[in-house]
Image (cartoon, grey):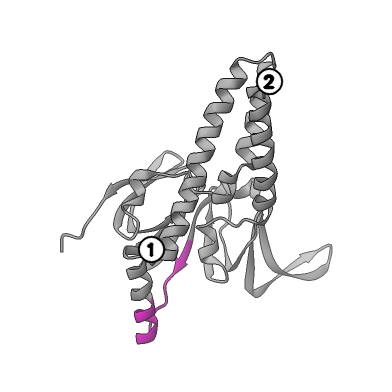
Amino acid sequence: MDPFLISIIIISFTGVIGAFLKGRHRDRCLKHFQDLQTKIIRIDKKDVWGLVNVESNSIEIVFQEDYIIDIDGVRYSKKNFIIYKNEFKEIDKLIHVLDIKSELGMQKRKRLLNSLVKPNLFKKSWRKTLIFFNIVKDALLEVAGTVMKKTKLSEANKDKLLGTFKDNSLNSYSGSSHEPVWEKYIGKQVILEQIVNGNKKEYVGILKEYSSQYILLYNVNIDIEQQILIADIIFPRNNSIIRHFSSNMN
């Protein structure tokens, strides 16, 4: 069988499966904030806060108190705020301030952090599966790109085919953009570097998870209204990167 035809069949098959799963997929970092009280800081726009509901193509923030507005002399109450996928680029960070006051809450948090360092067999297997999807995707892209270079398709059509595969592939479902150097630091303290509007700032926290779009850090000390609070924070990868492994000196 013609190698080009084989590549098209593989791309089409994985694209169909990937498109179906993508429509149901919620980002691996964002879904950790599902139903949690969260403040979303947006770049050069008003911040919003409330209970988070994560969908595949949007983030809904449900207000705990109605926001009353006047439109053409009629009063209405706003009950939520929706950020759509094309607006995700406006997000600076998502912050969930920890409120662990009970002994039970502290123990639950400790067990959660311990599970990061020593994941069970199921979690290990699931993570290996996600990594496998990314490796397969990269290999298929490389093969398809090599084969297409030898075809008579125009460059625009070649780019379109490869672009469709990237957008709808199983990688979109796994959403991990595998970073081998980060894997060994999951559950450990790292220093994240974020640059917004040319200003660089560093954050120290425990690496919980990362996806193709976001990085989730646990137990970050952050200044909110002149108070140093402990929070879990999701950073967008388009302006943030894990720069250092860290340990406490005290």
Quadrant where the N terminus sits is: top right
Q: Where is residue 126 in the image (x, y as percent from the top left)?
A: 47, 58
Can you identify the residue that label 1 sits on? 218
- In reply to whether residue 44 is colored magenta, the answer given is no
Answer above or below: position of 246 versus 226. Answer: above
Q: What kind of element bears circle 2?
A: helix
The range drawn in magenta is 95-108
Q: How crowded is mark 1: few (under 14 residues within 10 Å), some or many (20 or more)?
A: many
x and y, in percent, of residue 150 in the image: 61, 14
Q: Residue furthest front?
A: 1
Q: Position of residue 242 (x, y in %)?
A: 35, 47
- The quadrant of the rendering that contains the C terminus is bottom left
Kindly identify the amino acid type of the residue bearing the numbered disc 1.
Tyr
**Position in image of residue 125 (x %, y %):** 44, 58
The residue wearing badge 2 is 156
Secondary structure found at label 1: strand
Quadrant in which residue 103 is drawn: bottom left
Q: Which amino acid does label 2 sit on?
A: Ala
Q: Residue at x 61, y 42 (%)?
A: 169
Left/right of residue 191 with respect to residue 25 in the rendered view: left
Residue 60 visible here:
yes
Q: What residue is shown at x 62% (from left), y 20% (from top)?
A: 148
Q: In the figure, is residue 70 to the left or right of 100?
A: right
Q: Give the image quarter of residue 31.
A: bottom right
Crowding around mark 2 (Cα neighbors within 10 Å: few <14, some 14 to 19, many 20+) is: few
